[in-house]
Image (spheres, grey):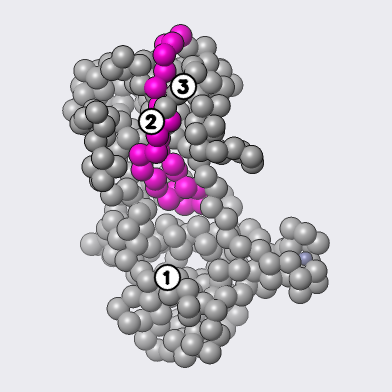
Amino acid sequence: MHLPVSAVPPMAFAGSPIDRADNIRVDPAALGNLMNWRARVLNLDGLLPEFDDDGRLLWHTLADVGEDTELVFLGMMDDRAHFAPVPVEGASGPAMPRAWQVMQMLQPEDLALYGGARSLIDWHARHRFCANCGAPTKPAKGGWQRNCDACGAQHFPRTDPVTIMLVEHEDRLLLGRQPRFPPRMYSALAGFVEPGETIEEAVAREIHEEAGVRVRDVRYIASQPWPFPSQLMIGCTSVADDPEITIDRTELDDARWFTRAELEDARAAGPDGNEQMIFPQKFAIAHHLIAWWLDQ
Ligand SMILES: [Zn+2]
């Protein structure tokens, strides 16, 4: 028996309250009319958001941003147009420790709005030149496209699909440790979907590559936008018949089977975990996938 997908709670970075209003993106006159004193512009520190003590995003007006600032149209909210500025410099650099802190301080709706804006403006910052001919590109359609005048190519913001998956064998789950994880942290195995693959094929390939385990019955459970820089995490479950593990040490420090009781204990131990394991944090889809399995 499986719980319905609706039993998975809302994910961090999901549930943005903004109306994307794509009909306005393609209408320069309508967009121009909305660029008035009521419009709001996301207040950013590089790629990081600025926010108040209640975890609400801070916003500028158009009067606060320079004439040369490149703006993307995020959408409509409270009958106002909302924009985000594209940083002048290409927005590389991890800044992840600050980003993790920020994620835990923002209200859920503001986190979702910020995550979408972050992915979009980061894409602009890294796509100033045409991938086809190398000439400079210009934003179009409210910032949901970039055009190259030199060769006529049109470029669109991309979302990269990543599968993240539970593997089940006789009431145990296969979890692994990436070298970058904190000590004792175990999570669901994950990997990018490659060209020419279905989601199901990517799940099976990744598990076999990383842990040497063959799986069947891959099923979709839930997804999560992950704006670092622009992944879509596709949460799945699968079943293994043979539990023999062969770890790919270039990908994983460790992989092992956890019993239901072990996972329950680690979850109950909270963010610092117990002696054996730290359960994935709540902002990660892995937390919700494992919790979903445990609560069946
Ligand atoms: Zn070009």
Q: Residue at x 50, y 24 (%)?
A: 207
Q: Does residue 227 show up magenta in the picture?
A: yes
In-front residue for pair 74/30: 30
Q: If the image is split into quadrants, where does the C terminus sit?
A: top left
Q: Which residue is mark 1?
A: 20
In-front residue for pair 233/277: 233
Q: Residues within 10 Å of mark 3 (few under 14, many from 20)?
A: many
Name the N-terminal-most of marks 3 and 2: 3
Q: Which mark is residue 149?
A: none
Name the N-terminal-most of marks 1 and 3: 1
Q: Position of residue 145 (x, y in %)?
A: 60, 68
Kindly state the secondary structure of the residue where label 2 is placed. strand
Q: Residues within 10 Å of mark 2 (few under 14, many from 20)?
A: many
Q: Quadrant of residue 250?
A: top right
Identify the magenta region. 218-244
**Foreground tag (2 vs 1):** 2
Q: Which residue is mark 3?
A: 215
Q: Which residue is mark 2?
A: 237
In-front residue for pair 80/99: 80
Q: Main secondary structure of the magenta part?
A: strand
Q: If the image is split into quadrants, where does the N terminus sit?
A: top left
Q: Position of residue 116 (x, y in %)?
A: 44, 60
Q: Residues within 10 Å of mark 1 (few under 14, many from 20)?
A: some
| Amino acid at circle 2 | Thr
In-front residue for pair 100/196: 196
| Amino acid at circle 3 | Val
Distance of mark 2 from mark 1, alpha carbons? Answer: 31 Å
Marks 3/2 in contact by CB < 8 Å: the verdict is no
Q: Residue at x 37, y 71 (%)?
A: 19
Kindly state the secondary structure of the residue where label 1 is placed. loop
